[in-house]
Image: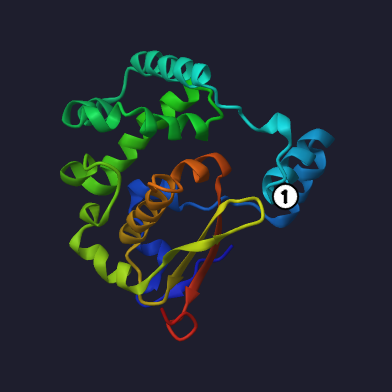
Amino acid sequence: TTNQQGEGGSQQEHAPQSYSWLWERPQVTFDDLKLEHDAMPVEERRRNLREKYGLQLQGDVTVETPELIADSLASMSRCIDGIEQKEAYETALFMNPEHVSDPAFQLAFLRAESFHANDAAHRIVEYWDRKVELFGTERAFIPHVSTMSLLVQDYPALSKGGHRWLHSRDEAGRAIIFRYMKYGVNNVDSMIRLHWFVMHSVIFDQDFGEEFQKNGCVILAANGLEDRILPF
């Protein structure tokens, strides 16, 4: 895949080295993907197709009972205690214990890992590591991600658009996020922070957040679109 060219060179030139975990694209071709797909067991292929099109079967859905939630939260807490390197998480817990310990906040990570407590524990620890890396210590520990989390240099990218949470859902009830990068928006730092802002708006929405945590979302991505194509 080639990088889109904008003003001032390629987008890759503006990507900070420390953000490679978000920016690097896998060096694969469609032939590679086809070979991998063809090598999968039949049931795994079917499961992937169900996930792609939101065709969940009863066995794919976790039934959330009060007992499961309570046991999983307790297990995740024990797993977090067993992780040695978690400085950002511990700082967040010290500065805002009500937010970090909120079961509603923690449940998002359990749902993302299908209630596998150990995986969810590592996910939430890495979440705080990445949040500090992106937003800095002054803004990383603000509950969730809002416009207050953004830096001054992020607002030009915000005014250009770039990410939109559409009001409609797909047929499987998943949220739809349209992501695009217009020419003239070359600050990759800002685009990444805006992506976090939009994802937080979806995942932790007061009315629909729980629904989207369970159903997931679909991201439609396009690069290098001009203002005249998307005039909003």
Tell me the quadrant of the picture where the N terminus can be found. Answer: bottom right
Who is closer to the viewer here, 221 or 66?
A: 66
Judge left or right: residue 13 versus residue 29: left
Q: Position of residue 51 (x, y in %)?
A: 68, 44
User: Is any atom of residue 42 visible in this view?
Assistant: yes
182 vs 177: above or below: below
User: In which quadrant of the rendered view does residue 82 lie?
Assistant: top left
Task: Look at 72% across and 29% down and name the residue there.
Answer: 59
Judge left or right: residue 31 versus residue 94: right
What is the secondary structure assignment of the residue under circle 1?
A: helix
Q: Position of residue 132 (x, y in %)?
A: 26, 41
Tell me the quadrant of the picture where the C terminus can be found. Answer: bottom left
Task: Look at 24% across and 56% down and name the residue there.
Answer: 150
194 vs 51: above or below: below
Residue at image mark 1: 32
Q: Position of residue 50 (x, y in %)?
A: 73, 44
User: Is any atom of residue 41 visible in this view?
Assistant: no
Question: What amino acid is at disc 1?
Answer: Asp
Q: Position of residue 85 (x, y in %)?
A: 31, 22
Colour option used: rainbow
Judge left or right: residue 25 versus residue 29: left
* Crowding at mark 1 (Cα within 10 Å: few <14, some 14-19, many 20+): few
Who is closer to the viewer here, 4 or 213?
A: 213
